[in-house]
Image (cartoon, rainbow, N blue to C red):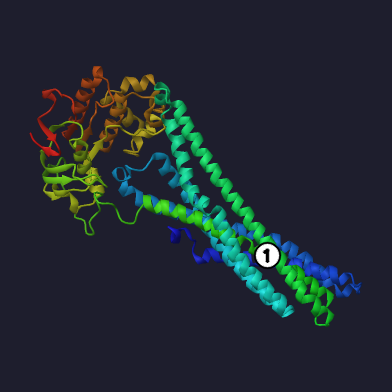
Amino acid sequence: MLRLALPPVRRLWAAIAFGVLSGGSAVALLASSAWLIARAAEQPALMYISLAVVGVRAFALGRAFFRYLERLSGHDAAFRQLPEVRTELYTRLVPLAPDGLGGTRRGDLLSRLANDVDELQNYPLRVVQPLVTSGLIALLTVVGAFLLLPGAAIGLLVALLLAFVAGTLVNTWASGRAERRLSPLRADLSDAVTDLVRSLDVLTAFGALDAAQQRVDEASARLTAAVRSRAVGVALTGAVVSVLAGAATAIALAAGIPALDAGQLDGPGLAVAALLPLSVFEVFGTVPLALGAWRQVVASAERISTTATDELPAGIPVDPASPRQLVVRSVPELELRGLSARWPGASRAVLSDVAVRIEPGERVLLTGPTGAGKTAVAHVLTRLVDYTGSYTIDGIEAATVRQDDVRRIVGLCEQQPYLFDADLRQNLLFAKDTATDDELLAVLERVGLGDWTAERGGLDAAVGERGALVSGGQAQRIALARALLADFPVLVVDEPTANVDGAVADRVVRDILTTAAQDGRSVLVISHTRVPDELIDRSVRLEDGRAVA
């Protein structure tokens, strides 16, 4: 992630070059100003100081001008790199969703996708650029000081090395722990706020709102304390650097005054030697702070990497290196033989030696107690979870073809369908983005939502965040409408009555099975409740991960 966050050299070199020019202008400005003031005090002819006057103006303008160009080119390079970081992150996350992310809290995941990714832009901006730029400026300044007064140059070099070591140690001691904890603490706060906002109605109903608010307050207090600790570390680091800058000036005076008395150095030269350390330390002071920024960047990169790993955990399917082409009938046969599977990260199998066959156009009911593995069967059929044994589609082993090809054949209506915080039209279009409004209205009519859609004002009706404005049965029907638009030959419906009260559960199941089977597609209904016998062709029961009937 760190390599990916660093822009290519062709983009970064410009920012570093402008940074060197800006820092060099700042050092040259103070040096030329010191020389000009000291030389003007000797009241020479104007022609002897005119070049210095021009230099002061040029360096003053150059410092601001090159600083602007450094910020512009540096941020442009960093911002251009962020899309590649986000693309890589999402590329790694897609195979993990949904089962590989089951142990990650929503707020924490949001923080990793937003705050931690944004923190990576500081790698080139606050780590690489300051270190390279300050190092070059310090080296050039020491060389220039050596040509002017070797003793002062040696003192400046020693002071710079001490500032680097002492500033780093002080910054690490005062704020190192806080900097490493900032990203996790931001995630804790995000998670607490997310839980509070998303579950506000439930927390209020059960009298747990005060406890949830206290959790937010405590997370905010911990984050605030860490930010203050970091600020203290920054202040102490600045103090150490300032003290050593003064020490370098004292050393320059101690070496310059005898040289002045001996005629080896004139007055303007002494002024330059004495004030040169102040200017270079102003630039060099960012080095210890860059190491603090490095700790924050590393912490964010580690959090991202632990979520989106290079290697997928066991239980997550991987496309074969040379996938077969999945050529099947319009409605294929699905067969599981000796199939076993486990949830990603789980130590024991959730399915063991399962054997199920779904004939073309057949309506099969899969029942069993809670925890028997019914949802695991649905996720195996849609290749969200890997398996051992055999799972064939018209005789073709599913593990030998691309996962996306399997998912074009087998569709899943989940137990809790996800509805986006948009209108009804947008919630349907992602299943078939070329569908017209007439097609959308027709499919809503098929799933029994025609009158409801008209009453809500048509396809522009809002469904609310995660479907807050629709009932559980309506959410299931919207999910079924998506499946019909996507035209899956085989449809798996997972617990369609889980969020529906008993009065309408039978009607929802009846409508789903009747509508889904109208076009001859196969339907596997997963339910722990009774389904009327006339709606299904066959029933299979799971117990302890095994098919027993």
Residue type for callout 1: Leu
Q: Nearer the viewer, residue 335 or 368?
A: 368
Q: Could you say where residue 371 lies in the image, as x and y percent from the top left?
A: 20, 35
> Viewed as shown, does residue 198 lie left or right of 282?
left
Q: Height in image: 195 above or below 294?
A: above
Residue that appears at 78% across and 76% down? 256
Q: Could you say where residue 476 lies in the image, as x and y percent from the top left?
A: 28, 28
Q: Could you say where residue 332 lies in the image, as x and y percent from the top left?
A: 14, 42
Q: Within the image, what quadrant is residue 467 found in?
A: top left
> Viewed as shown, does residue 12 lie left or right of 437?
right
Residue that appears at 72% across and 64% down? 246
> Viewed as shown, does residue 418 lie left or right of 170?
left
> Viewed as shown, does residue 283 lie left or right of 546?
right
Element type at mark 1: helix
Q: Is residue 237 visible?
A: yes
Residue that appears at 67% across and 74% down? 142
* Local crowd size for mark 1, using a 10 Å CA cut-off: few (<14), some (14–19), many (≥20): many
Q: Which residue is mark 1?
A: 244
Q: Nearer the viewer, residue 520 or 88?
A: 88
